[in-house]
Image (cartoon, helix red, strand yellow):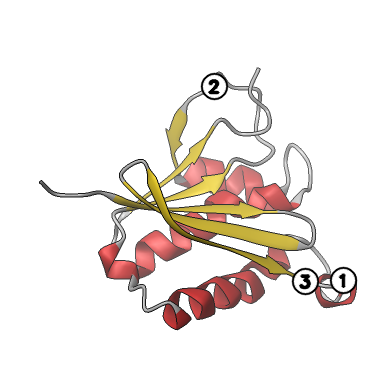
């Protein structure tokens, strides 16, 4: 039987939590904590993208996890228009709304952005968000 690996990404104001699941079982997790001074050097939350991406990739390398072995990437949903609960494929319109902070600025806006970046680096895998904070 073939297993399915999912990397989840939950960016907060001074942390990024990641967890790797194999089917429904968590097989590893990590919380990267940042000082306020580390994140305050960035003019906007979106400017933290590379900083947080590098931190996540470092943890994955240290744990000998290759992006290509991950089947899907799921980010914490950000501030979008009110939507129903569920799983949403990350798309260009969603990224545009999050990057422009059309509905507000919060670290959770990075969830979809980081998931999409990692999915692309993994060879064009899928990126999703699940039950974003704006679920109505």
Which residue is at 55% across, 54% downward?
Answer: 9
For the question of whether residue 98 can be seen, the reply is: yes
Residue nearest the viewer, comparing 24 with 90? 24
Q: Earlier in the sequence, mark 2 or mark 1?
A: 1
- C-alpha separation, residue under disc 2 versus residue under disc 3: 30 Å
Secondary structure at numbered mark 2: loop
For the question of whether residue 123 can be seen, the reply is: no
Which residue is at 77% across, 71% downward?
Answer: 34
Image coords of residue 89 (percent x, y): 41, 39
Query: As drawn, is 119 to the left or to the right of 42?
Result: left
Residue sitting at the far left: 1
Residue 40 badge: 1
Picture quadrant where residue 40 is located: bottom right
Residue nearest the viewer, comparing 19 with 88? 19
Q: Which residue is mark 3?
A: 34
Image coords of residue 96 (percent x, y): 58, 48
């Amino acid at each position: 039987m073939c297993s399915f690996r999912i990397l989840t990404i939950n960016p907060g104001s001074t942390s990024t939590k990641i967890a790797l699941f194999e089917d429904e079982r968590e097989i590893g997790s990590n919380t990267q904590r940042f000082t306020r001074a580390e994140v305050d050097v960035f003019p906007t939350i979106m400017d933290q993208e590379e900083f947080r991406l590098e931190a996540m990739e470092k943890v994955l390398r240290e744990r000998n996890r290759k992006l290509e072995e991950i089947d899907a990437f799921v980010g914490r949903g950000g501030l979008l228009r009110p939507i129903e609960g569920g799983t949403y494929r990350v798309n260009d319109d969603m990224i545009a709304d999050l990057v422009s902070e059309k509905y507000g600025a919060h670290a959770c806006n990075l969830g979809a952005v980081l998931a999409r970046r990692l999915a692309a680096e993994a060879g064009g895998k899928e990126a999703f968000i699940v039950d974003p904070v704006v679920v109505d």
